Image: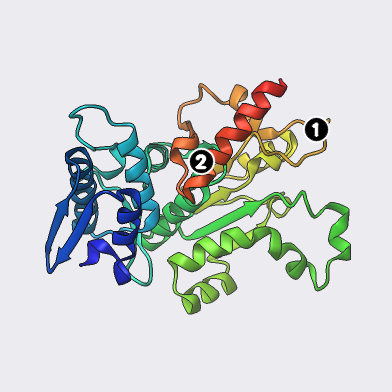
Amino acid sequence: MVVLGFDDKNLSQLEDAFPDTTITARGNRIKLKGPEPDVDTLSEILQEMISIVRRGGNVNRHDISTLLALAEKIEGDTPLKSPDFEQDTGDIILHTHTGEAITAKTHGQRRIVKESEHNDILFAIGPAGTGKTYTSVALAVRALKERKVKRIILARPAVEAGENLGFLPGDLKEKIDPYLRPLYDALEEMIEYDKLEFQLSKNVIEIAPLAYMRGRTLNNAFVILDEAQNATNTQMKMFLTRIGFNSRAIITGDVTQTDLPRKQESGLIVIQKILHDIDGISFVYLDQNDVVRHKLVRDIIEAYDTFESKKR
């Protein structure tokens, strides 16, 4: 059964979460036996998993972790239903070259998708693991496939490189690539390797340090600035003023994780005060509830937030 995953990995995850409940799967039938509250909750989780598959998606361990986390917050007879898994809401962004559906899995990710459709410039701000970059890259790839834009440009500040860049082996590209690796990783999941290599060679898809954007006008492009908390005020202004005709941009970052020198203010922090009331520009804020990595990532973020609050 597709719902239960390859080698029944999804089934094993559910069994671990409900140790007092027996789950028996035969053909297309699933039988549950155990405490009534557990059976009811597990039944609703399975229904949500089935609905994801029916919409063309694949259920993975992150989806199940999200559903389990939602189940913990439910009281009484409230049905297990979140904006992330509602039917007929168009939460599939695109399908990868292997046929896997990439979906907006959380409320914050769904807001990125929705706001991007109605605004030419979008800021997605939130902690690590919330899928800001991955969702944004998926939207860019979809726009390119649908020929809404002619190219994708992905940029990142390489502040960690600094003066240490000269000590790294290789030419400039080889020195810079490690800082841009997360963007390559996302693209490699969405686009077949040979096709991606061709598009990169023809600059249909371009991945470059933020400094390379200076002096350019980016027309007919989907532009993403990742890790924007490491952009200075000057760099942020430079990037935003590069955007040309028939282009859209998504700027992602985590304002709590800046790597800039202590006396240098993050452009992502300042820009929220400058552009907050301009039509066509939207801000989406994600939090620990949008984390889609390992379930412990959310706990780690909350622990750090608590620690920083006590320090302040």
Query: Hey, which quadrant is residue 80 in on the image?
Result: top left
Q: Amino acid at mark 2?
A: Arg
Instruction: Give the class, few, some or many, for how many residues have Cα within 10 Å of label 2's Cα (few <14, many ≥20).
Output: many
Q: Nearer the viewer, residue 144 or 60?
A: 60
Residue 171's mark?
none
Residue 298's mark?
2
Instruction: Give the class, few, some or many, for how many residues have Cα within 10 Å of label 1's Cα (few <14, many ≥20).
Output: few
Q: Is residue 54 left or right of residue 108?
A: left
Q: Say which quadrant the C terminus sits in.
A: top right
Q: Is residue 46 left or right of residue 252?
A: left
The answer to whether residue 222 is above or below residue 232 is below
The answer to whether residue 173 is above or below residue 41 is below
Q: Nearer the viewer, mark 2 or mark 1?
A: 2
**Residue placed at 46% from the left, 27% from the top?**
279
Q: Nearer the viewer, residue 284 or 87?
A: 87
Q: Say which quadrant the N terminus sits in.
A: bottom left
Identify the residue under disc 1: 264
Q: Position of residue 78 (x, y in %)?
A: 20, 30
Q: Amino acid at mark 1?
A: Gln
Q: Is residue 246 left or right of residue 257?
A: left
Q: Position of residue 176 (x, y in %)?
A: 74, 62
Considering only order in the chain, which callout, 1 or 2, is on the residue closer to the N terminus? 1
Q: Position of residue 51 (x, y in %)?
A: 19, 52
Q: Position of residue 195 (x, y in %)?
A: 47, 76
